[in-house]
Image: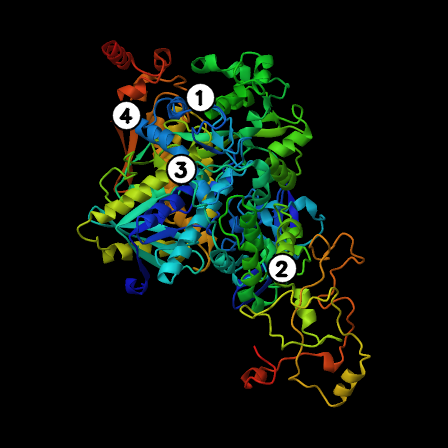
């Protein structure tokens, strides 16, 4: 027979709740979901929890176990120490409905916004011919069971409710990648869509999504990075965008950079300088002089520019050969903080109300 | 009492209950016919049990072996169902499934490919040629995702044309229907609740398509998810429709029996198709001892011949591990009963010693991955412990084969997929259910749409019926003296698993009926603790009523049918009886009680029966039927 193990399970709803202690019988070979079912059948019949297949195939029973996003049907009790208390909480990125059940409708909204497969006009059903090697790239992404653990763990939206409208998340980046790599998909602008509408640029490749994927889909390496590399040809990268918001030495500014929301006009490639540098500590006498007079908020700042690419046309996002373990600073590694005030480019909201003519055309 | 006027109301042309393969395909068809369509999903959208199907979807496309065609598929299906199938359904299924599969590619599905770029097809138990379109071993997921994404694409069209994603097709996720509402004999709507909030919801619709799947949660060892509580079967019965073939349940021969975290989880037949063999605790490959006479011609007699088949199927007969599911399940059951089983009560399924680790990982990726992660079992290194698991119910709503319209007194009710009966006869072939979903999902959705077109007036939902449904739904919450629903479910599972399981006998079935009658009393008094918001105890309390009535149908029909055939094995009547082949057992409700009737099977058309060998027919048909067959053959000459 099994022995008693300690569990702490979050109980509550959108108005609040807390962790409750349970002492539950656990038998050899069981998973966390087995234990939750035992709790429901005994002392907590109304404990809310989603599950379906109990075989790691449907992606319903996502929750956070000891702080880690997991499928509870795939989390063996034998992975915990005998004396360890197992803490089970709902997914943090989505609003709680009750207990371990969260409102994941965000994901269904994003799914609905992602343009569907566009069948080729000239092929009737039954005439599709594709090689196995060509479908395999998309098939990797179609393994997705929509557990939304990648969405839950993505720090762009985890604890950042404000980013949700503009950001679709890893699940839908690989959906875009899947369609982009589909041999017969008739739509050709999947990459641009990912960049312009899905907020691919927010992703700074920390690979948390790949780490939690229960299907072991290489979300970052095989989905997001290829999409980023190719959109760079036409668009711009967040690192560059952020860098370009900072006044750059030795270059005549063209016009005021706008915040890079959708619809902003960005001319790429017009003024490529090769290596982009950021103003760190200042040694520029003109800038120092200006700093003495205070910040001129209406000064012109440079246009966003393309980053340097190597001879294969790829960004220097070389995670394998990078000289440090963590992700690079999104502001560029040659920037030290705090920045001198003259290099700040804070766009005061009232600036938008000013009549045009001072160089701040939007 | 809450007034019914405050219930959220929706008006639709077609309401599809169930969001698995059949439901989604039906909804797509109804929406394409221009009908305003609602999809009711008990779980989140895209989580339906269809994702569990691993092997593939059977369709005679002839991509791998050009000798395959619909006639061969039809023969295999009838053979698998032991000739009890509704022949017309088997015929439509065999003819239409290639179109339904190809159609999926236009929705974006990516099946595995042959060398010349066509959809690859794999071998499977009971299919004469490689016939199953597949995607690794996650075909069901591909199917559900493809249909889900097609629905999204239709919603995008509606957004473009009408300004609203949900203008013509809407998914009500985590919503359960507890009652169908009738205006006289005509379907007028459906009543249910949102799981999330516990709020009630009323759909007014002249046509309802049931696509709720099966009944497996009434069994102890099952591969089915919590949703499989026979809702559609029970809703149909209460609305005046009839069920057929309820005695036939498929026990998948190879479900994991150990360790407990994977108990009931299926080991796909492809493991056997790709070289896996069954061994007892003595290490003997025992399936050679269990080839029934009707199959002896098609199956190898020696291990050597069987092993040659994997590489040269044209010149060798297939290994007996690939016999239809019921035969394999029975063989395992016999071995275990004879004391040659594993400690956990199964047998060994061994692929580790027969294929290289690399090959196993390549051919069965999610199988490998699933057991490694769920149970720390490495199928490339050690044999699996498997045994029969309740997997699929062949029986279901008795429908018109062409339209999917339910028989009985009700009008405007349609059924497709596992909840409908007849297509698979007494036993379903692997791979036939995914194609069944598509073929009959499309038909049911299309016919539901045209049914609404010919209605002179829209049926009205009677107020009294809504009040009754609401009261019934709230009752378990308002009682605090009744039993815990989880205990009642365990008791029901024990009765069904122990007494109406894979091998049945009269005394046990009689006992089961007595116990089910007791359970009925207890279920009527069940009480659920807690409130209405996402309360699984309450949800189970409401589902119990459905599980119970469907279990009664199964037990009654199992007691009545005095023979063994397909998914119904009687220890006291161990052989197939041609007389019983001509009979369907039909269940209906008389008030609360299940009434059982005999009904003759429809007679197969001459050109269809002509597809079979006389010697084969002789195993199934009565002498009278055979004489009739001979007379026709004579005439034709």
2 and 1 marks in contact (CB < 8 Å): no
Q: Nearer the viewer, mark 4 or mark 3?
A: 3
Q: Which residue is mark 1?
A: B67
Which image quarter holds the C terminus of chain A?
bottom right
Q: Which residue is mark 4?
A: B601
Q: Tag 2's secondary structure?
A: loop
Q: Chain of mark 3?
A: B
Residue drawn at 41 percent across, 18 percent down? B574
Q: Are marks 3 and 2 on the same chain?
A: no
1 and 4 marks in contact (CB < 8 Å): no
Front position in the image: B513 or A185: A185
Quarter residue B10 falls in? bottom left
Of the numbered discs 4 and 3, the one sitting upstream in the chain is 3
Q: Which mark is residue A154?
A: 2
Q: Chain of mark 1?
A: B
Of the numbered discs 1 and 4, the one sitting upstream in the chain is 1
Q: CA distance from mark 3 to mark 2?
A: 38 Å
């Amino acid at each position: 027979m099994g022995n008693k193990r300690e569990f702490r399970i979050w109980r509550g709803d959108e108005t609040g709740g807390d962790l409750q202690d349970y002492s539950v019988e656990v038998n050899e070979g069981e998973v966390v979901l087995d234990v939750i079912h035992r709790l429901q059948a005994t002392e907590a019949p109304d404990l809310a929890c989603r599950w379906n297949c109990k075989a790691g195939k449907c992606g319903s029973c996502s929750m956070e176990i000891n702080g880690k996003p997991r499928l509870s049907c795939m989390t063996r009790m034998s992975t915990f120490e005998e004396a360890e208390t197992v803490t089970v909480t709902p997914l943090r990125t989505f609003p709680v409905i009750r207990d371990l059940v969260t409102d994941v409708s965000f994901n269904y909204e994003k799914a609905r916004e992602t343009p569907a497969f566009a069948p080729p006009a000239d092929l009737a059903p039954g005439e599709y011919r594709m090689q196995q090697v060509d479908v395999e790239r998309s098939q990797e992404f179609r393994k997705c069971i929509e557990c939304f653990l990648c969405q839950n763990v993505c720090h762009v939206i985890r604890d950042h409710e404000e980013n949700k409208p503009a950001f679709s998340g890893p699940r839908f980046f690989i959906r875009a990648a899947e369609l982009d790599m589909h041999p017969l998909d008739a739509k050709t602008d999947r990459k641009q869509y990912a960049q312009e509408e899905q907020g691919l640029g927010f992703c700074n490749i920390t690979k948390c999504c790949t780490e939690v994927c229960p299907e072991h889909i290489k979300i970052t390496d095989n989905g997001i990075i290829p999409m980023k590399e190719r959109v760079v040809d036409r668009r711009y990268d967040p690192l560059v965008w952020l860098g370009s918001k900072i006044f750059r030495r030795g270059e005549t500014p063209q016009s005021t950079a706008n915040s890079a929301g959708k619809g902003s006009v960005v001319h790429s490639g017009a003024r490529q300088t090769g290596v982009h540098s950021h103003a760190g500590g200042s040694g520029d006498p003109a800038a120092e002089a200006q700093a003495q007079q205070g910040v001129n908020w209406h000064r012109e700042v440079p246009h966003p520019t393309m980053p340097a690419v190597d001879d294969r046309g790829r960004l220097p996002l070389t995670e394998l050969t990078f000289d440090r373990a963590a992700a690079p600073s999104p502001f560029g590694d040659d920037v030290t903080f705090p920045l001198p005030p003259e290099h700040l480019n804070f766009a005061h909201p009232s600036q938008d109300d000013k009549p045009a003519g001072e160089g701040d055309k939007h | 009492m809450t007034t019914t006027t405050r219930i959220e109301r929706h008006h639709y042309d077609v309401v599809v209950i169930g969001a698995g393969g059949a439901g989604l395909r039906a909804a797509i068809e109804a929406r394409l016919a221009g009908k305003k369509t609602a999809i009711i999903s008990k779980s989140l959208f895209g989580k339906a049990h269809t994702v569990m199907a691993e092997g593939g979807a059977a369709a005679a496309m002839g991509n791998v072996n050009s000798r395959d065609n619909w006639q061969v598929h039809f023969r295999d299906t009838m053979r698998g169902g032991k000739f009890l199938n509704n022949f017309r359904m088997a015929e439509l299924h065999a003819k239409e499934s290639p179109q339904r599969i190809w159609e999926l590619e236009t929705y974006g599905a990516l099946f595995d490919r042959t060398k010349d770029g066509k959809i690859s097809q794999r071998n499977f138990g009971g299919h004469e040629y490689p016939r199953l379109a597949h995607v690794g071993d996650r075909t069901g997921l591909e199917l559900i995702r493809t249909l889900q994404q097609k629905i999204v694409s239709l919603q995008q069209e509606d957004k473009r044309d009408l300004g609203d994603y949900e203008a013509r097709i809407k998914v009500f996720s985590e919503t359960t229907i507890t009652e169908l509402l009738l205006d006289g004999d005509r379907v007028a709507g459906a009543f249910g609740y949102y799981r999330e909030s516990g709020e009630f919801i009323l759909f007014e619709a002249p046509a309802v398509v049931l696509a709720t799947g099966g009944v497996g949660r009434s069994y102890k060892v099952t591969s089915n998810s919590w949703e499989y509580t026979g809702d559609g079967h029970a809703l149909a019965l209460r609305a005046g429709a009839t069920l057929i073939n309820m005695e036939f349940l498929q026990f998948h021969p190879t479900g994991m029996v150990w360790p407990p975290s994977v108990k009931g989880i299926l080991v796909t037949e492809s493991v056997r198709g790709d070289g896996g063999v069954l061994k007892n605790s003595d290490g003997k490959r025992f399936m050679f001892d269990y080839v029934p006479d009707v199959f002896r011609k098609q199956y190898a007699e020696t291990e050597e011949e069987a092993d040659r088949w994997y590489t040269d199927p044209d010149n060798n007969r297939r290994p007996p591990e690939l016999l239809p599911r019921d035969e394999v399940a029975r063989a395992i059951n016999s071995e275990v009963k004879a004391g040659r089983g594993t400690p956990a009560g199964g047998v060994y399924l061994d692929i580790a010693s027969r294929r290289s680790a690399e090959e196993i990982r390549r051919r069965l990726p999610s199988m490998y991955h699933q057991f490694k992660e769920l149970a720390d079992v490495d199928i490339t290194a050690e044999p699996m412990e498997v045994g029969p698991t309740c997997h699929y119910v062949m029986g279901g709503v008795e429908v018109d084969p062409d339209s999917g319209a339910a028989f009985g007194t009700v009008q405007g009710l349609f059924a497709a997929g596992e909840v409908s009966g007849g297509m698979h006869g007494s036993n379903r072939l692997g791979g036939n259910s995914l194609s069944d979903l598509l073929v009959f999902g499309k038909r049911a959705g299309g016919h539901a749409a045209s049914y609404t077109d010919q209605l002179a007036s829209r049926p009205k939902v009677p107020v009294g019926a809504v009040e009754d449904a609401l009261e019934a739904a709230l009752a378990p919450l308002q009682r605090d003296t009744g039993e815990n629903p989880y205990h009642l479910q365990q008791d029901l599972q024990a009765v069904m698993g122990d007494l109406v399981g894979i091998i049945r006998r009269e005394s046990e079935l009689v006992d089961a009926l007595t116990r089910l009658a007791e359970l009925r009393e207890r279920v009527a008094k069940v009480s659920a603790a807690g409130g209405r918001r996402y309360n699984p105890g309450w949800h189970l309390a409401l589902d119990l009523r459905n599980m119970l009535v469907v279990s009664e149908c199964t037990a009654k029909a199992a007691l009545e049918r005095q023979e063994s055939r397909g998914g119904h094995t009687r220890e006291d009547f161990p052989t197939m009886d041609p007389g019983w082949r001509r009979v369907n057992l039909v269940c209906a409700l008389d008030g609360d009680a299940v009434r059982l009737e005999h009904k003759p099977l429809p007679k197969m058309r001459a050109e269809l029966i002509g597809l079979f060998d006389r010697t084969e027919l002789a195993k199934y048909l009565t002498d009278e039927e055979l004489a009739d067959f001979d007379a026709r053959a004579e005439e034709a000459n």
